[in-house]
Amino acid sequence: MLFNSIDFAIFLPLVFIVYWLLQNHGLKWQNALLLVSSYIFYGWWDWRFLSLIIFSSFIDYFLGLSIAKSDVKRKRKLFLILSLVVNLGFLGFFKYYNFFAQNFADAFTFFGQSIEPSRLNIILPVGISFYTFQTLSYTIDVYRKKLEPTKDIIAFFTFVSFFPQLVAGPIERASNLLPQFFSKRTFIYKNAIDGCRQILWGLFKKVVIADNAAKYADMIFDNHNYYSGSTLVLGALFFAFQIYGDFSGYSDIAIGTSRLFGFNLKQNFAFPYFSRDMAEFWRRWHISLSTWFRDYLYIPLGGSRGSTLQKIRNIFIIFIISGFWHGANWTFIVWGLLNALYFLPLLLLNRNRKNIDFISSKNLIPSLKDVINMTLTFCLTLFAWIFFRAESLQHAAEYIRNVFTDSLFTIPNFIDQKITILILSLTLLFVGVEWIGKEQKYALEIMKNIKRTPIRWLLYICIAFLIFLFAGRAQDFIYFQF
Amino acid sequence: MKSFIFKLFVFFLLLLIPIFLVFVQANGYSYPFYLRFTTPKQSSLILGTSKAAQGIRPDIINGILARDDIYNYSFTVVHSPYGQTYLKSIKKKLSKTNKNGIFIVTVDPWSLSSNKKDVNNPDIFVELNNCLSNTTWVNTKPNIEYLLKNYNKPYVDLLRKSEIKLHNNGWLEVTVLMDSISVNRRLLDKLTLYKEGQMTHSGFSKVRLEYLIKTIKYLKQYGKVYLIRLPVHPQIMKIENEYMTDFDSKIKSVVLETANYFDMTHLNDNYKYTDGMHLDKKSAKEVSKIIAEWIQSEDN
């Protein structure tokens, strides 16, 4: 079920009302309702893959208990490895089998031995990368004795499949989300309003910004040989807003929806395009994934400790794996590699924690230095996004080659001038609101500071109306495929 | 909780006002079929696919026959091939008060075809998932049900003017470049589409033919039915002849119901087509005139 669909618009209020009606009947009933709702939400897409989530949940539920029960280190490790093998095995099979089969065959062909790869017609289960990482955080934390395993099977299964964040994150840690299933949730008006506001902003990002930017990004990327260099830059720019609007929009809707049910999820995006260097960008972009990799991969590898060579190795490992997590394509690996290259000088020069605070905190106008740093960082990101969006490395290379021609300094081609200008104006307005609200958890939170109710309501209605105007057929979220 | 739900309810109620105003703005420029679902019930209909939608002008026929009630209720080959869906929709659109209606029923091989996998299985008919099938009300303005279920573009486009105009009488006016290069390019595209697509994947459906007869029988209760095959570009005609060599013999069973049949394909060379399949605006006017005169002669 898509957040931006009529189905969800009916599903959410129904679950919401029944959920709060069950408030006095105990947590177990509320959790059970959330579990059933989550399975309906997921099964709406393809009920066959529910078996995967249920199986993963079973495995990790029992392995969590087994790890905690055992005092023998080898045994505990064995249970953890079993959890890793099962979960990553599913992920590897569904997401990466064809990639490895093809590359294996290509490697043989390269050495003069042509073989036909045995490809399978595999459907990638939506959200598998997300819930796999979420459930792994549970077994790893139990193994590390940072978390007590739960015996409440309903609560655990609901934690794995919690519908607001099941298919595209934020990837919640068991230590943050799981305990919330055991504490009494009470309806708090202020939180519910805040949740609705965040959902509204998420829908605006998705429907108005991302889906419109997508049309142009797709058109330009798919026909890159016919466009001028400047138009190709515009194409990359559109993609940058598409992916940000799409993914951070999803996260906003997920966090907002969770708040309606009395849950608090972690912030997943903190205005990454206002970053002044790549280290800051990675602290603000897809925070739940970055911190997952940091805590479960980077730090165990030694992190930023050890020799320079070890530091370089760790950075490359984490960024390449992060790229590969996004999809079974060399383009994602190169995207990760590029980001490692961007990040490395900052780490080696010990400047990776230079920009911790908000850019031009408490000021509306940034300093010239901040503007320059922000622009440079954005340009680097834009360049890397070309690899992320391209169908293949060859596509990316051609795209970049076509950018750096004389036509880079011409006026971009506008296919439908009026509508392009309208979309660009809305994008500028969006950037403006994000800038004003950059010190909030999400930009629209700033609206709560408007004291006059009619003005606040008018603005909400305007945003909702814009969402309606730009809503066509519900478009998939990009991160569903990851 | 109550206050939250109440405020949310008021919010959505207020939001409905501008949304309703946008829906009211939808017109013949908004979407090729929209107006057909907003006009009142009609007593005389032109039926068929996009060939008829673009090729037969009710205003010309009305003028010659001194009537004012002929309405074009033709859609496209994926919306309105003959079948249960189209018949149901026709029943909804038809005003049953008049018994002197005129029904111009156009036929060609494509409107009697279905997927080759199982040509006679109504469960896989192409029109099952589109507007004729899912729109309950075909005469309300604004038709919110239609817009919500079938408008697959952003609603902001309802406020923009397209190159296609659906007239109040149901005629679909398409304005495209008619220079020889553009026309030839579109013709080639159409030929490829039909050779590689329709011809390979479609086959004659007996069920569709039966529904055509059912449709005619139903319409006969409310007036006179005229069966017509519209002209097409000679190269498309060649494909149609190859595709359904016995079309004429198949249509004989239908002619028994109507007692008339006007095959205009002998006039193929006389007209211009936007893409080989559809008559251009000027030719549509000429063809409509000929049809009206034929109806006059049939009545006399």
Image (cartoon, rainbow, N blue to C red):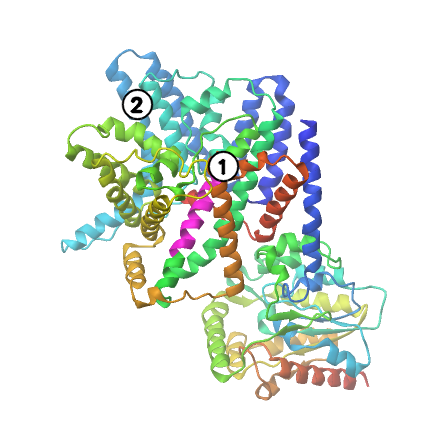
Dominant SS in magenta: helix
**Which quadrant of the structure image shows residue A351?**
top left
Count the marks: how many? 2
Q: Which mark is residue A442?
A: 1
Q: Residue at x 59, y 21 (%)?
A: A186
Q: Which residues are magenta?
A: A236-254
Q: Position of residue A161 (x, y in %)?
A: 47, 30
Is A459 located above or below residue A224 in the figure? above
| Front residue of A141 and B196 | A141
**Residue found at the very far bottom of the displayed protein:** B270
Q: Position of residue A259 (x, y in %)?
A: 54, 29
Q: Check disc 1 and report its element: helix, strand or loop.
A: loop
Report the quarter where the N terminus of chain B lies. top right
Q: Which mark is residue A80?
A: 2
Q: Can residue A3 be seen at all in this image of the molecule?
A: no
Q: Amino acid at mark 2?
A: Leu
Q: Check disc 2 and report its element: helix, strand or loop.
A: helix
Report the quarter where the C terminus of chain B lies. bottom right
Q: Position of residue A154 (x, y in %)?
A: 50, 22
Which chain's residue wears label 1?
A: A
Q: Residue at x 30, y 56 (%)?
A: A396
Side (left or right) of A211 relative to B58: left
Q: Measure the alpha-carbon separation of dots 2 and 1.
A: 36 Å
Report if the CB atoms under discs 2 and 1 are less than 8 Å apart.
Answer: no
**Which quadrant of the structure image shows residue B21?**
bottom right
Q: Amino acid at mark 1?
A: Tyr
